[in-house]
Amino acid sequence: MWENFNIKTFPAETIVFCEGIYHPELSTLESTDINKKYSLPIHIIYVGEISGENELNINLSAANQNVFLDIKIKNKKPAFLNIFIKNTGKNSEFRGHIMLENNSDLTFNCEAKHSAYDTTILVNTKLLAGKNSKSKLTGTAVIDKNCENANSDISFSALADETARIEFMPAQRISTAPIKADHSASIYKPTDFQIKYLRSSGLSGAETKQVMIEAFKNDFSLF
């Protein structure tokens, strides 16, 4: 299954969703509430095709716990995905890699809330926007009072068809000075040099486009 979605697995406790539905037979944990420390990191996997309203709540309350989120979804019908992340675990770290393929109308919202000191939440969201698609992506980082040493990053990037419409809305609500709090949004466009290099290697126009799409989808090296 994971080969089909190009998900890298590793020794971890797992929480698995497919097409918006939790699958206990593929998971080792019973819920997304991470209320105790595990010897292994926790890997939350959310894959497949979605439509309509979908919601994912992640409550990280254990100290010194590493949590990884991999989302790879696509939609052919209008869809909404709402993600709430709350970290109250001292020295706990959350890292999310999210890949959205929109072929219709997609609304995506992520709220990352730091509610204890020495917490980390880093979420990198990529969007592949198809022909005539409409995308609205909102990301909000919240750092509560008395939450010193927070490390927060909410980032968006997109590779879009010329006919696609995209709206980015990154935001921050900070009540305590963090170690780091970043947010960003960008549109990726292949350079003339990249295109010429691939074409000189013998690739056709369609093959060059597909290579650039795959490179964009799979490169999370900067995060």
Image: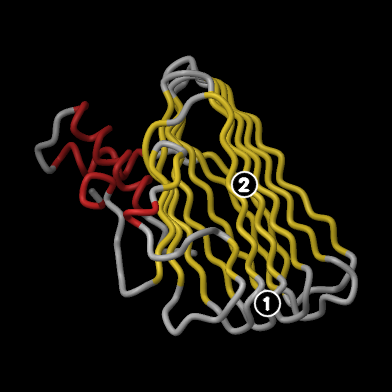
Judge whether 134 appears above or below 45 on screen.
above
Q: Secondary structure at mark 2?
A: strand
Using the image as rendered, state which of residue 179 and residue 7 is in the foreground. 7
Amino acid type, label 2: Ile
Using the image as rendered, state which of residue 100 and residue 160 is in the foreground. 100
Q: Secondary structure at mark 1?
A: loop
Total tally of numbered discs in the picture: 2
Residue drawn at (31%, 55%), measured in percent from left and top? 7
> Mark 1 = which residue?
89
Percent position (x, y) of residue 218?
A: 34, 51
Category of crowding for the residue at label 2, using alpha-carbon neighbours closer than 10 angstroms: few (below 14), some (14–19), many (at least 20)? some
Using the image as rendered, state which of residue 142 and residue 57 is in the foreground. 57
Instruction: Pick whichever of labels 2 and 1 is earlier in the sequence.
Output: 2
Percent position (x, y) of residue 63?
A: 63, 82
Residue drawn at (64%, 55%), measured in percent from left and top? 154
Residue drawn at (40%, 53%), measured in percent from left and top? 16
